[in-house]
Each structure stands twice: as structure tokens, then as C-alpha cells.
Image (spheres, rainbow, N blue to C red):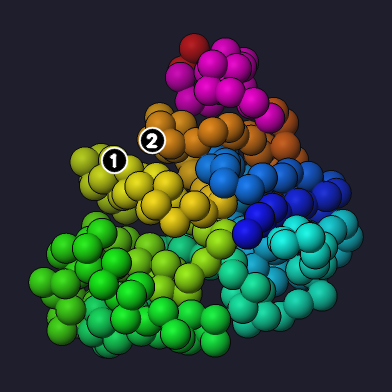
């Protein structure tokens, strides 16, 4: 089942503050695309536009799936999740006073995922054994790395076709960043997901990305069609390599 995200000439922001300026990207079926940029350049706003949390002032956000072309700007966030798009939000946004298992089950609320709860729960516990061991523990009492694993697993409980991951490295020690990023790749390959990952950790993101965009002040300043092309770009050298 093919799924592609197309963002075309989007303007978006918060009240009088415009964050995105005629921004265009696409994430093709089965790709992992990295959206690279430092804090405050619009990565999270773009993710929220795709999820219907922020409404664009202009432009299109489209899901192309199974021959249909769906305008996400006219859909609620609940409807977008129902179409098979899941989000791992920045800061994890778990329910801290619920257990690990209760958080996971809440991820499976959409009708299309309810029949797969047993299978998806077993898969999440296989992918993240620490979650099985702590299934009755309150989510808020877990370490940052464990909470990030739970946030990824909760998104997978919705049986998504498209996975949006917002800043998975924030607040994690370097070794945990490597583990979480590697796990996202493993899950993407096993589930044949289409992945858009917003990240400022260049070295980690490019380990798993097929290609990447660089966003600066709400505009796409460079699109790298390969990691070699990306690493040779002057913006990358300036912002990420200190050259």
C-alpha cells in the first residue's frame, strides 16, 4: 500500500508570527527523509502541519495513498491518524501517571488498529524488551531513553503507514540517541514504513536517512539527494561540521 506525503508551498505559523515560508518537500513511499535544522527553524511546525495540529495559511499538504490524493489541510488530526499517519512528538508527550502498557494501548485507539492490538503489543515488547519488563511501571518514572522508546512504540501501536518523528535525540545521552535512531531504522524496514524525521543531530540522522532537506528560517535551503551530496554542501559544512 503506497503512501507518499507531499507538502507544496506551505505558509504557516502562530497568530501574526509566520514560521514556514512557501515550504515544499516530499517523502516518497518507503523512504526515510531527514528534515535537518537547528532549533527555531520550523521543523516541528512542519510536522504539526502534516498532522493537522497547525493549519497552513496557504499551500497544500497531501497524502497520496492507494491511488487517492487526500488534502490533509481539510482533515482533523483524528482523521489524519485514521489515515495511517502517526507522530512521535518532541518531548515524548506520554501520560506519566499511566503505566507503560496503558500508554501503548492508548496508541491503538484508531479503528484500523484495534484488531491488531495483540500482534502490535507483542511486536513492541519484542522490539523494546525493556517495555515488557516495565509494562506495569508508571511512564513518568522511567528514564528519558526508556520514555523515548515508549513514545516510538506507542506510535507503532496505531499500525501506521507513515511515521513522523520529531526530534528523537532531545534530552538523551549520545549512546541512547544511537540506539533510538537505529531502532527507528529497524522498525521502518520491518514495517515498510515511510518516515519523516525532524532532527538537529546531523550525524545520527544521516545514518538512517535516504536523503535530507535543510530548513533555515522556515525555508528549504537545500535538498540532498544522497548523503554524499549532503555532506558536500556548504550549509552542512557551516552548521554541522564547523568548516
Circle 2 residue: 204
Q: Is 1 drawn above or below residue 76 in the view shown?
A: above
Mark 2 nearby-residue class (10 Å; few <14, some 14–19, many ≥20): some
Of residues 52 and 211, the one nearer the viewer is 211
Cα–Cα gap, marks 1 and 2: 7 Å
Circle 1 residue: 178
Q: Which corner quadrant of the image does residue 111 belong to?
A: bottom right
Q: Which residues are magenta?
A: 223-241
In the rendering, at what x and y percent does residue 168 appear? 40, 52
Quick check: can you spot residue 34? yes
**Regarding mark 2 in the picture, which secondary structure is present there?**
helix
Q: How many marks?
A: 2
Mark 1 nearby-residue class (10 Å; few <14, some 14–19, many ≥20): some
* Residue 91 shown left or right of residue 19 in the figure: left
**Regarding mark 1 in the picture, which secondary structure is present there?**
helix
Residue at point 64% right, 35% down? 213
Labelled pair 1, 2 in contact (Cβ < 8 Å): yes
Q: Which corner quadrant of the image does residue 145 belong to?
A: bottom left
Q: Is 238 drawn above or below residue 15 in the view shown?
A: above
Amino acid at each position: 500500500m503506497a503512501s507518499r506525503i507531499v507538502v507544496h508551498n506551505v505558509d504557516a505559523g502562530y497568530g501574526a508570527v509566520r514560521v514556514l515560508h512557501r515550504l515544499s518537500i516530499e517523502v516518497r513511499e518507503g523512504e526515510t527523509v531527514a528534515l535537518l535544522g537547528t532549533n527555531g527553524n520550523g521543523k516541528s511546525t512542519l510536522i504539526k502541519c502534516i498532522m493537522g495540529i497547525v493549519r497552513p495559511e496557504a499551500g497544500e499538504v497531501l497524502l497520496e495513498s492507494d491511488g487517492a490524493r487526500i488534502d490533509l489541510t481539510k482533515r482533523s488530526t483524528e482523521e489524519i491518524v485514521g489515515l495511517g499517519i502517526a507522530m512521535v512528538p518532541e518531548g515524548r508527550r506520554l501520560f506519566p501517571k499511566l503505566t507503560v502498557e496503558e500508554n501503548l494501548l492508548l496508541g491503538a485507539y484508531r479503528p484500523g488498529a484495534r484488531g491488531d492490538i495483540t500482534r502490535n503489543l507483542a511486536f513492541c515488547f519484542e522490539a523494546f524488551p525493556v517495555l515488557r519488563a516495565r509494562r506495569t511501571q508508571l511512564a513518568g518514572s522511567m528514564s528519558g531513553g526508556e520514555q523515548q522508546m515508549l513514545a516510538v512504540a506507542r506510535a507503532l501501536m496505531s499500525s501506521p503507514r507513515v511515521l513522523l518523528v520529531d526530534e528523537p535525540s532531545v534530552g538523551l545521552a549520545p549512546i541512547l540517541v544511537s540506539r533510538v535512531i537505529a531502532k527507528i531504522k529497524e522498525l521502518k524496514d520491518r514495517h515498510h514504513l515511510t518516515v519523516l524525521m525532524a532532527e538537529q543531530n546531523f550525524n545520527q540522522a544521516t545514518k538512517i536517512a535516504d536523503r535530507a532537506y535543510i530548513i533555515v528560517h522556515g525555508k528549504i535551503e537545500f535538498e540532498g539527494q544522497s548523503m554524499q551530496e549532503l555532506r558536500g554542501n556548504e550549509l552542512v559544512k557551516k552548521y554541522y561540521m564547523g568548516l
